[in-house]
Amino acid sequence: MHLMAAAAVLGLSWPPWWGWVTAFVLSVLGGIVATSFAGPHVAAVGVSPDDRLLVRPVGLMRVWALSSGIDVPVSAIIDVGVSPRKGLVKGWRAPGTYLPGVMTAGTFRRHGEKALWMVGRAKEVLVIELHSETYRHVVVQVEDPHAAVEALRAAINRER
């Protein structure tokens, strides 16, 4: 009890709302870190029977990306590939979540183009380039990006 009295005398006590702010910030950071360690994929990528590319966030990634994913025709895909996460340029985040080395999620803008990111701590990510759509690039972490590239290329060839 003497320690608390001494802190109050020295002016070291926090305002009453500060504890709530600290708890909120720690909860958000803990949720981001927990999501990034949750599993090998943070997004589901697939092609529907009517030839539409579907990219959906998995779990809490939907909250951190502030997005429900995309649904575009397969014919809008220009190219797909696998790239090292560290070599990609993100741009300005608006809106989304970015914690360096842990999570990149949301919409990122660069030179008038938008990219949708849903990436945790993966070394390699799936990159989908689109034309005439809301997003120019979609960068996602999936369990096996090389298998996803092959599946998407097969869907593109089937469409053409």
Image: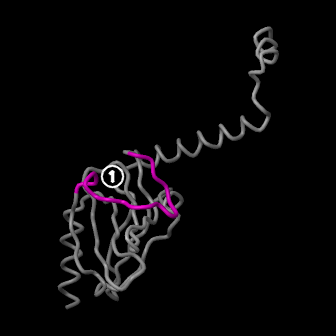
Q: Amino acid at mark 1?
A: Pro
Horizontal side of 93 relative to 18 (left or right) equals left
Q: How many marks?
A: 1
Tell me if residue 155 comes above or below residue 119 in the rendering.
below
The residue most toward the front is: 111
Q: Which residues are magenta?
A: 84-100
Tell me if residue 12 comes above or below residue 40 in the rendering.
above
For mark 1, give the secondary structure.
loop
On the image, the x and y values in percent for residue 86 come to: 27, 51
On the image, the x and y values in percent for residue 153 come to: 19, 77
Horizontal side of 14 relative to 150 (left or right) equals right
On the image, the x and y values in percent for residue 137 come to: 33, 71
Task: Tell me the quarter of the image containing the C terminus.
Answer: bottom left
Q: Residue at x 28, y 74 (%)?
A: 129
Q: Residue at x 32, y 83 (%)?
A: 131
Tell me if residue 158 comes above or below residue 39 in the rendering.
below
Q: Residue at x 44, y 58 (%)?
A: 105
The residue most toward the bottom is: 160
Q: According to the image, label 1 marks what residue?
A: 40
The residue most toward the top is: 2
* Residue 155 sits inside the magenta stretch: no
Say which of 126 and 48 sits in front: 126
Q: Quadrant of residue 114?
A: bottom left
Q: Quadrant of residue 148?
A: bottom left
Q: Residue at x 73, y 36 (%)?
A: 18
Tell me if residue 131 comes above or below residue 141 in the rendering.
below
Say which of 159 and 6 sits in front: 6
Q: Crowding near pointer 1: few (<14 within 10 Å), some, many (20+)?
A: some
Which color scheme is applied?
A: one colour
